[in-house]
Structure formats: C-alpha cells, structure tokens
Image (cartoon, helix red, strand yellow):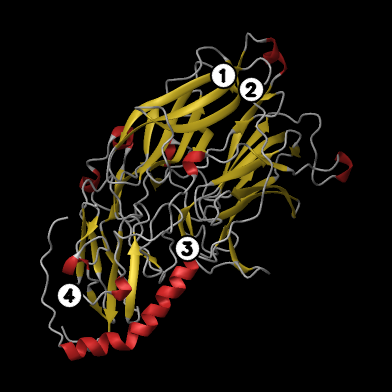
C-alpha cells in the first residue's frame, strides 16, 4: 500500500558520501527535532459555542431514509449524480434534515480516516430543468433546522437529484449508505396550516459549480495580533474570478423577503464564513458561522461543528440588495487545498413579521447569536494521529538513493523513496538541483483513484489521519492526478458553459481518458479534463523533501535535491 524495484548502483565513493552527509547531519537532526516539537505543539482553538438541537416540532414525523448501498472502490474520490427516490409519499413540509454515512453491513458510522462524506447535495425542483440545491451535507454533518413556523415545501411531484462524493482514504473497498432523517409535517397535520414556506438560497464563494473549491496557501492573508495568518476568500484573492469574470460569491436579491436561517460549511483549516448584505453602497455583516473545533490540535481535522442562526434570526431584504459570502482560513501552519466556503440560506417568498432591516435601526437589533446544531461526533475524532510510526522510515536519516527523473505511482506506492519501503527501494531518490522529478500516476482506474504530491515538513513519518500530515513543507502541490468528466452548466443552473464535475486538474484531456467514468455522470459528460503527470519545481534548494498524498494520507515519500555537480 510491493513489488521489488530495480535500482541503480550508487557510484559515489565513501569519501564523497561522507562529504555529502556529514555537512548536513547536524542540520538534519536539528530539523527533525523542530519537526517533532512542532507536531506536539498544536493547541486547540477556544470557541466553545453552545449546542441547540430542538428535535422534531409538534406535528412532525421522523422519517429515516438512505441511499445505496454504494460500493466505494479503494482510494475512490469521484463525484457522481443519481436520482433520489426515497422520500415522503405525501405532500407536506420538511422542517428538519439530518445527514449521515453508515456502513452497509452494520449501520455504524465509519471513521473519517477510513471513508468519509466529502459532500452530498440534494437538488430539488418541479422537474429536471428547474433543479436547485436545497439540502446538503459535508463531513461535519450540520443539521438543517427550520425556525418554528417555517419549512421547506415538499410535494410528491418534485424531482430530487443527489450529487455525492464519498471518499475512501484506504486501499480497501467500503460498502456504505448515505442516510438522511427528515422531520416532516404532512399536509394532513393541523400544524401544516401555519407553516410559512421557505426556499434555499445557495451562497458559495465559488458559485454553483459542480466542484466549488479554492486554495488557501500557507502564510497568505492578514497577520493577526496573535501572530497567526488568516486568509479570506475571495476578498484577499485578486484573481478569484478572473478566469471567466463571473463574481460567484454574490446574489442580487430578486424579491422582497426575509432570511430566516443559515449555517456555513468549511474544510479543515477553516475558521468562519461571513454573510453580508449590501444596499446603496453600505454593507452590513448579518451573520458569522463559526467553526468550533473539538480537535485538541485545533483547526486541522473534521472533528468540528459549524454554528447556525438562532430561531429568532430574521433579516428583511429588498429586491436589488446584494447578498455576499466569504470564507476565512487559518494559513499559519499549513496550506489548505481544494477547500470550500458555503452558506445555505433559508428565505421566505414575502417579508414576514419580526424581520429586522439592518439598514433601518427603527426595525430593531438583529440577533446574531450562533449555536451548534450538534455536539462532537464520535466518527469525526481523529484518534492516534502524530504518533511514532515504525512502518515509516525517517528520510532525513537515510542515505541518498539512486538518481531518478521519474517516479511511478502504482497500487498506492511510490516506485522509489516510498517511506513504507524497506531497503534500497525506500531510499530518497536523488534529483540534481535545477531539475524536476516527474511523477506519473498509473494507479488504475485513473477516473477514480486520484493521487497528489503534496509537500509536508520532513520527516513527515508520524501516524496519519485527517490532521496529519499537513501541507506545511516546501509549498509544492500537484493537484489531483487522474481524469474526470465535464458537464454543461445548462444541467444545473443555466448558462452554457462547460465545468469539471471532478476533483482533478482542470486541463483538457482526450475524451477516451474518461471512458471508465461510472454512473449517471458518465452519461451526461460532455468532455474530459485532467493529467496523470506532475513535475516538481526546478527551483528547490539542495535538501530532503518529504511529500504525501492528500487523498490517501497513509502514502508518504521523499526525494533529495543534490548540488548540480554531484556525481552519479
């Protein structure tokens, strides 16, 4: 997760070896000490937001549904789309929504270190041409709670489509169900007569893209008084929307109404999302959804819950107002790749009593108190991380391996310099200064089994999970190597653009590379993107460079850049 590898003989003399390593031995040991100290020096973020889980309101039925079973292939990290058939058999109102992921064989929730729910989005509409994202789940599994007296209208004539991405972090297949519990008030219940319908307004820093992600790079952003760095997207990303010119984090309100609920979604490293409202050149923040990390190491794992609005949060908006969202990440300790910033907002069709206009003080003061929708989730606890791992070697202390210009990834193994390899095959390959080392992902199928080459601070050989390794090394990252499909935006939100529905690099590829894409996505695909090749930067200084796969963090490797005059 190992077949033997042919090796070149090391032609350096004993004297040259001594010269090469003696000068760096003390520095390497010192770096090892700093790395070990850093690994044990993480501190928890102090937020401690109260939990508010109201449970089903009067008149509500508790309906349990599931989708699957799904066979998640070893290392799988793809997006798929399916029609969702399990739902209520009568009309009514959905007033609560609780997502989950369980093993098919026993109904227990798997550890996020094994398989996790990257995302699931339920798109709802009267037909396939009018679908809108309505309910959603990320790995933190935030609950949807409509305020008392409000609910999402449901009819049996609706079409439900599920966009899901289940991520297998291991080299073994997993069988799982995607679950969702609805608090449902049928039209036949007396309480239904007093429900005010709400719709979902999806606010996303990358708009309604099939895979709406961005990167928060280590050290970018604003230095805080505490000495940390915080990066806010898109505010501190000047080229955030340069590619197509579409400002994706804003929505021009198209009718007078009242916002009645919201909560944010972030990835590890995320601190908060902000929802703002602008009118006549004035902008007001109307809610901040904060990440409350139970994780002792702080903002590095999925051991977190996001905060949501209080039941009396009501914001009156007018047609022409501009609603915006941004997301803030802690970039002090690591880079965070392919992260998200989303806020799911409930809005009424007309203004309702009790709403506050943030631009009119006479309407009252907006209650911006926030609450977690659930407490700590056992399956999200990142146990056993950052411990000594006898199965991984320390590349700093290893002698240099053969000169290599190409490393192949196959069966979750790097062909040279894999830290799990014993003997010569596990030695870090040598790369001349000023040259690149080429990595090629040959881990079939390339439409499912993606890998990254992501720099981590050497030696990068402790036990892994979600919160370790971190992307805190020399700053290089390959993106996800593999191939995935594109689809037309006509299918999910208007316009006639082509967007990737995949996590791989957005680089045009021959359609034949996506021939093996499974499910409905393979049917609706109109193109293919991706690459299986990555070249390391040529400007790396002499030294040992550790890396890992962000998709499968048990995969670790290292290479060594040597001075250009070093002899083979």
Residue 537 seen from this side = no
Disc 2 versus disc 4: distance between alpha carbons? 64 Å
Mark 2 / mark 3, whichever is N-terminal: 2
Mark 3 / mark 4, whichever is N-terminal: 3
Disc 3 versus disc 4: distance between alpha carbons? 30 Å
Q: Which mark is residue 402?
A: 4
Q: Which residue is mark 2?
A: 56
Looking at the rendered structure, the secondary structure element under dot 2 is: loop
Disc 2 versus disc 1: distance between alpha carbons? 7 Å
- In the rendered view, would you say 446 is above or below 259? below
Looking at the rendered structure, the secondary structure element under dot 3 is: loop
Mark 3 / mark 1, whichever is N-terminal: 1
Q: Which mark is residue 335?
A: 3
Task: Please provide percent x and percent y for residue 194.
Answer: 72, 17
Q: Nearer the viewer, residue 496 or 284?
A: 284
Mark 4 / mark 1, whichever is N-terminal: 1
Task: Please provide percent x and percent y for residue 22.
Answer: 29, 87
Mark 2 / mark 4, whichever is N-terminal: 2
Q: Which residue is mark 1?
A: 62
User: What count of labels does the image hold?
Assistant: 4
Q: Which mark is residue 172?
A: none
Quadrant of the frame with the C terminus: bottom left
Q: Are marks 2 and 1 in contact (CB under 8 Å)?
A: yes
């Amino acid at each position: 997760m190992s077949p033997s590898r042919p090796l070149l003989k090391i032609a350096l003399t004993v004297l040259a070896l001594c010269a090469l390593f003696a000068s760096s031995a003390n520095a390497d040991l010192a770096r090892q000490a700093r790395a070990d100290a850093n690994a044990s020096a993480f501190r928890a973020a102090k937020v401690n937001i109260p939990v508010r889980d109201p449970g089903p309101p009067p008149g509500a039925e508790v309906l349990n549904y599931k989708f699957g079973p799904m066979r998640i292939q070893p290392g799988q990290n793809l997006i798929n789309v399916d029609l969702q058939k399990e739902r209520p058999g009568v009309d009514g109102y959905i007033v609560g929504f609780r997502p989950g992921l369980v093993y098919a064989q026993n109904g227990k929730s798997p550890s996020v270190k094994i398989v996790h729910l990257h995302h699931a989005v339920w798109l709802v509409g009267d037909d396939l041409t009018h679908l809108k994202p309505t309910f959603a789940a990320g790995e933190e599994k935030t609950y949807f709670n409509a305020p008392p007296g409000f609910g999402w209208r449901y009819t049996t004539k609706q079409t439900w489509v599920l966009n899901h991405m289940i991520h297998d972090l291991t080299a073994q297949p997993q069988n799982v169900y995607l679950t969702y519990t609805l608090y449902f008030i049928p039209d036949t219940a007396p309480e239904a007569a007093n429900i005010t319908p709400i719709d979902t307004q999806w606010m996303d820093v990358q708009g309604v893209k099939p895979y709406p992600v961005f990167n928060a790079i280590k050290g970018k952003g604003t230095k805080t008084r505490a000495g940390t760095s915080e990066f806010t997207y898109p505010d501190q990303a000047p080229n955030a929307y340069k590619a197509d010119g579409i400002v994706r984090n804003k929505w021009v309100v198209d009718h007078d109404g009242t916002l009645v609920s919201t909560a944010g979604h972030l990835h590890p490293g995320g601190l908060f999302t902000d929802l703002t409202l602008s009118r006549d050149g004035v902008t007001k923040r109307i809610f901040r959804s904060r990440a409350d990390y139970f994780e002792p190491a702080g903002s590095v794992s999925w051991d977190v819950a996001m905060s949501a609005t209080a039941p009396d949060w009501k914001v009156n908006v007018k047609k022409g107002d501009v609603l915006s969202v941004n997301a803030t990440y802690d970039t002090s300790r690591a880079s965070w790749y392919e992260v998200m910033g989303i806020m799911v907002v409930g809005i009424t069709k007309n203004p309702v009593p009790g709403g506050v206009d943030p631009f009119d003080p006479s309407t009252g003061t907006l209650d911006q108190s926030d609450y977690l929708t659930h407490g700590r989730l056992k399956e999200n606890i990142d146990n056993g991380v950052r411990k000594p791992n006898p199965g991984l070697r320390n590349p700093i202390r290893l002698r240099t391996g053969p000169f290599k210009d190409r490393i192949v990834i196959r069966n979750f193994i790097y062909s040279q310099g894999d830290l799990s390899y014993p003997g010569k095959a596990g030695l870090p390959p040598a790369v001349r200064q000023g040259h690149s080392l080429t990595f090629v992902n040959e881990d079939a199928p390339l439409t499912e089994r993606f890998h990254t080459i992501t720099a981590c601070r050497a030696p990068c050989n402790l036990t892994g999970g979600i919160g370790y390794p971190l992307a805190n090394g020399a700053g290089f990252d390959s993106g996800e190597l593999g191939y995935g499909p594109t689809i037309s935006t006509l299918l999910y939100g208007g316009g006639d653009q082509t967007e990737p529905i995949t996590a791989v690099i957005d680089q045009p590829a021959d359609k034949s590379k996506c021939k093996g894409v499974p499910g409905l996505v393979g049917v609706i695909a109109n193109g293919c993107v991706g690459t299986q090749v990555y070249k390391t930067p040529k400007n790396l200084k002499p030294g040992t460079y550790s890396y890992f796969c962000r998709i499968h963090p048990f995969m670790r490797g290292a290479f060594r850049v040597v001075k250009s005059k070093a002899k083979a």
